[in-house]
Image (spheres, rainbow, N blue to C red):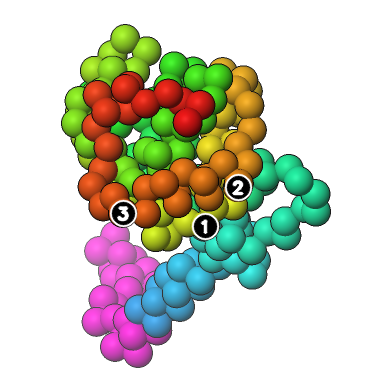
């Protein structure tokens, strides 16, 4: 038997590969599995945030629904208020702000004033115009929060910022009564403060 005959016999004995089209049902199944995976991730994945866990779907939900401890310490509430879409959006999670635009709260000379009067006014009515913080210039507008935050919320978030040692801040706490007093004094004021205006007001007022 010739070599060619042997090759032909071997070829017939081996299974022949057939390259047919991929079944439509398999493609559809693949899309369904990908879709289900994406939906599950969106519902329960927390977008890879290490502090998000079931049944919460985002870090904001975790912060919102954490139980508040009893007592007079407003710092935990202040942390919640800060990390909602209020302060953290502009001043960042580390309190360092955005260069040239949003000033830092960490180690800020404005934040660490002995009295919080100016800071309370900024949170209530907002701030506009160029400001110098720690010797650096910033120019942006901070929106007012007087209609969204209660006296307790304002006192809590300012206390959280002023007493945040990780940020280098060591100022005193703020009480809701202090916020209420300033809010009442500003009841007829609609416009935001400018830094020049605030510098003419004693932080103790």
Magenta stretch encompasses residue 28: yes
Indicate whether 193 appears above or below 108.
below
* Residue projecting furthest to the top: 135
Callouts 3 and 2 close, C-beta under 8 Å: no
- Number of numbered tags placed on the structure image: 3
- Return the disc, 3 or 2, that comes first in the chain's sequence: 2
Among the 4 quarters of the image, the one containing residue 131: top left
Residue 204 in view, yes or no? yes
Disc 3/disc 1 C-alpha distance (Å)? 17 Å
Callouts 1 and 2 close, C-beta under 8 Å: yes
The numbered dot on residue 171 is none
Give the residues drawn in magenta, as a range.
2-30
Which residue is the site of mark 2?
176
Disc 3/disc 2 C-alpha distance (Å)? 20 Å
- Is 121 left or right of 74, judged from the image as shown? left
Q: Position of residue 18 (x, y in %)?
A: 29, 78
């Amino acid at each position: 038997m010739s070599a060619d005959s042997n090759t032909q016999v071997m070829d017939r004995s081996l299974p022949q590969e057939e390259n047919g089209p991929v079944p439509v049902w398999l493609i559809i199944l693949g899309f369904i599995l990908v879709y289900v995976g994406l939906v599950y991730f969106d519902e329960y994945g927390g977008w890879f945030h290490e502090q998000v866990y079931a049944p919460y779907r985002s870090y904001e939900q975790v912060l919102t629904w954490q139980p508040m401890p009893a007592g007079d310490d407003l710092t935990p509430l202040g942390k919640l208020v800060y990390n909602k879409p209020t302060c953290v959006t502009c001043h960042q999670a580390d309190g360092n702000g955005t260069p040239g635009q949003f000033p830092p709260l960490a180690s800020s000379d404005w934040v660490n004033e002995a009295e919080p009067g100016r800071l309370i006014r900024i949170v209530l009515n907002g701030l506009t115009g160029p400001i110098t913080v720690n010797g650096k210039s910033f120019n942006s507008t901070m929106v007012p929060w007087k209609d969204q935050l209660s006296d307790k919320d304002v006192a809590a978030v300012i206390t959280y910022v002023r007493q945040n040692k990780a940020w280098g801040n060591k100022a005193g706490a703020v009480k809701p009564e202090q916020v209420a007093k300033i809010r009442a004094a500003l009841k007829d004021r609609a416009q935001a403060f400018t830094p020049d205006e605030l510098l003419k007001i004693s932080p103790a007022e």
